[in-house]
Amino acid sequence: MLSSIEDKVARYVADCGLLSATDRVLVGLSGGADSVCLMLMLQRLGYECAAVHCNFHLRGAESVRDEEFVRQLCERLGVRLHLADFDTEGFAHRRRLSVELAARTLRYDHFQQLMQSEGYTKLAVGHHMDDNAETFLLRAVRKTGVSGLCGIRPLSVNSQGTTVVRPLLCLRREQVEVYLRERGESWVTDSTNLEDEAARNRVRHMVIPALQTVSRQAVGNICSTMENLREVLKVYEAEMQRCIGLCVRREGDTVCIDRRRLQTCVSPLSVLHEVLWPLGFNETQIRNLLTAKGYRPNRPKDSARPMRLRGGRGTAAVEISWEEIRVTLAG
């Protein structure tokens, strides 16, 4: 018989269409409470699972402890375990990445390779409601759009093409720990999660507790707001696709935007943003193109004004007339 927490996760998985009976699930297993709960839960719900653990060798003896804990857990559960070792700091140095980004890149590249070679269909990770609320707050203070404010999705496909599912997004962190204690299971704790140097840890240890003095349901209310925003996003994306189809055409490497049709859209700025932001234009450039007055009399009509794109993406030749904006990307 399923416990109330297991039943809640089972209904969430079904409602969100995360897993089917035929899926072969690879579980990212760090040894922390979230991933241990996820592994046990999916096993109990009857899914075919294997685990993958990455040792990034960033925390000395603690990294060795985590790997040994995961090894013993999988042996006891009868779960196939894939182990990976990485020289994370060396990789970060060679690629000129932060250690955090290097670890993420190594992890998800390995996950994708493993899924392809072993035939796993879904990658399951242990994000829960508290993680989602923290993500919402971090993105809000760093500035983001509607999509960013939707937080962590129950199901997504990452840049490597991996289908990632998050069955525990319906649970609070405290529910995860209650579930493990009820089953007599232990877990390991990453000591860096107890420090306040990382922005996410400061949100977790200081901001969330402060918000809960305003409302005891702060985390749940933030997650409900994200669900509402995901519904709003569906309307937004549908309207953007309609407007882009109305206003935009491509001529080889050139994007042509009909300015007159653009002005009939509910939000011309949003349409321009959806078209030009992926090409490397920044917010100021996009706003300037929206308000451009066309060519001045002393400017040849066939001349193109180069714009430098953000992130070192090269330049774009931009031609503006009363009728349209023409953008051609250059190296």
Image (cartoon, grey):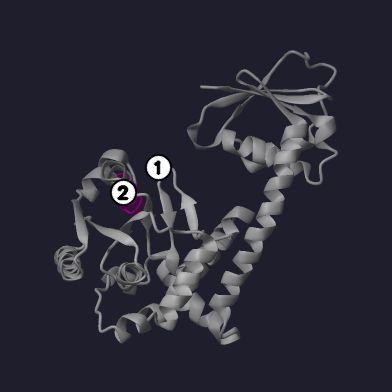
| Residue 144 as seen in the image, left or right of residue 300 | left
Of the residues under marks 2 and 1, which one precedes in the sequence?
Answer: 2
Q: Which residues are magenta?
A: 99-109
Residue shown at the point (19%, 70%) measured from the top left: 73
Q: Which mark is residue 276?
A: none
The residue indicated by pointer 1 is 160
Residue shown at the point (54%, 83%) measured from the top left: 212
Closest to the observer, 164 or 80:
80
Residue type marked 2: Phe
Instruction: Decide whether residue 106 is among the magenta residues.
Output: yes
The residue indicated by pointer 2 is 111
Q: Position of residue 280 (x, y in %)?
A: 57, 35
Q: Position of residue 171 (x, y in %)?
A: 46, 75
Residue 42 vs 50, above or below: the answer is below
| Residue 267 as seen in the image, left or right of residue 211 | right
Residue 40 vs 305, above or below: the answer is below
Indicate the secondary structure of the residue bearing disc 1: loop
User: For mark 2, does the 10 Å Cα neighbourhood hold few (<14), some (14 to 19), or many (20 or more) residues?
Assistant: many
Say whether marks 2 and 1 touch (CB < 8 Å): yes
Q: Position of residue 181 (x, y in %)?
A: 30, 85
Indicate the secondary structure of the residue bearing disc 2: helix
- Asked whether residue 134 appears in the rendered view, the answer is no
Real-space CA distance between mark 2 and mark 1, rounded to the nearest whole angstrom: 9 Å
Residue shown at the point (71%, 38%) measured from the top left: 272
- Asked whether residue 70 appears in the rendered view, the answer is yes
Instruction: Decide whether residue 237 is among the magenta residues.
Output: no
Q: Main secondary structure of the magenta part?
A: helix
